[in-house]
Image (spheres, rainbow, N blue to C red):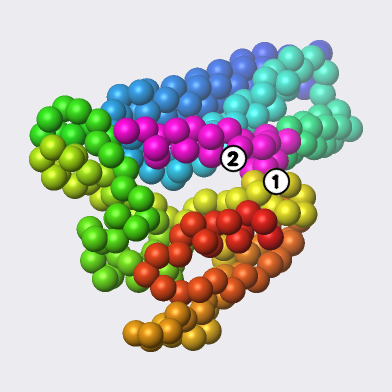
Amino acid sequence: MEESGLPTYDSWNNLAANIAMVCWAVGLLIVLGYFLKLLTTSDSKTKFDFINKYEIKLLWIAGLIIVIGACFFANANIIELNPLWIFVRVFTTVSMGMIVALIIQNLLKFYYPFFIEKRLKVLRYKPRISPKTGKPMKLLSEEEEDAYLDEGMQAEENLFSMDYDVWKDDETGYIKIEKYSGHLHAIQCPECNYQTFKVVREEILREPTATEEGEIAKHYLCSYCGHKARKVVGLKASNKFHEESHAATA
Ligand SMILES: [Zn+2]
C-alpha cells in the first residue's frame, strides 16, 4: 500500500472472493459426497446407520463452511478502509455469520430430526431381500424373534434400549439379525413436542428372577426444553412394545 494517494484493496478483495469460492466449493462437495455415498449404498441397514451417524453432522459442517465463505464474500468489495470501518465490518460480519450459523444449527437440531426419523423408519421396515432366494424376507414379531436371539442379545434389549430386528426367509430358514440402538432415537417430547426426548440413563431397580419380573427405571431428558421423566418398566424377556407405549403416552 502506498503512503501517498488512495490505497486500493484489490489484492485483499481478490483473496476474499477466492476464499469464498473455495469455502462454497468445499461445502457443496461435502454434501454431494454424502448423498453420493448414500445413493451407492444398497443395504438398508448400512444406509440407516450411515444416515444416523453422519447426516446431521456433515450438513452442519458444510453449512458452517458455506457461512464462513459468505462472510468473506461480503467483505470482498472494499473500497475504503480505516480503523472504524475495520471495526464495523468485522463486527457486522461476525454477528451476521453467527446468527445465520445459529439458525442452521437450530434447524438441524430441532426440525431436521423429524425428516430423518421418517426416512429411517422407511429404511428399517423395508423388506430385506434374502440372498438365498432373492425374495423379500419376513420381519419376525417380538415373540417370534426371541427364538433367534441369544441371552446376551435379549439382555441388551432389556437393559440398554437396544432393539434387534430378526428377518427370516421362510423358504430356506435364512436369518438376518439387525441391531438398533434405542439411545440414538429421540421420541417426541410431551412438553415441547420436539423430537428431542431421549433415554439418558437406566438403572435396574430389581433383578428379574425365574418366577418374578424385575424392574428397570429409564430416565428421559429433552435436549430442547430440559423436560425430565422417569419411567419404570417391567424387566422380562420381551417388553419392547410395552415400553414404547409407555414412553409415547408419558
Ligand atoms: Zn421438550
Relative image position of residue 134 (x, y in whole percent):
16, 27
Q: For residue 115: magenta? A: yes
Image point (18%, 40%), residue name:
170
Residue hosting label 2: 113
Residue hosting label 1: 194
Check the image and report above or below for 192 versus 234: above
Near-viewer residue (73 or 237): 237
**Viewed as shown, does residue 13 lie left or right of 149?**
right
Q: Tell me which numbered mark, 2 or 1, is placed earlier along the sequence.
A: 2
> Is the C-beta of the residue carrying label 2 under 8 Å from the nearest atom of ligand 1?
no
Amino acid type, label 1: Tyr
> Is the C-beta of the residue carrying label 1 under 8 Å from the nearest atom of ligand 1?
yes
The magenta span reads 103-127
Near-viewer residue (153 or 90): 153
**Viewed as shown, does residue 91 lie left or right of 13?**
right
Relative image position of residue 135 (x, y in whole percent):
20, 28
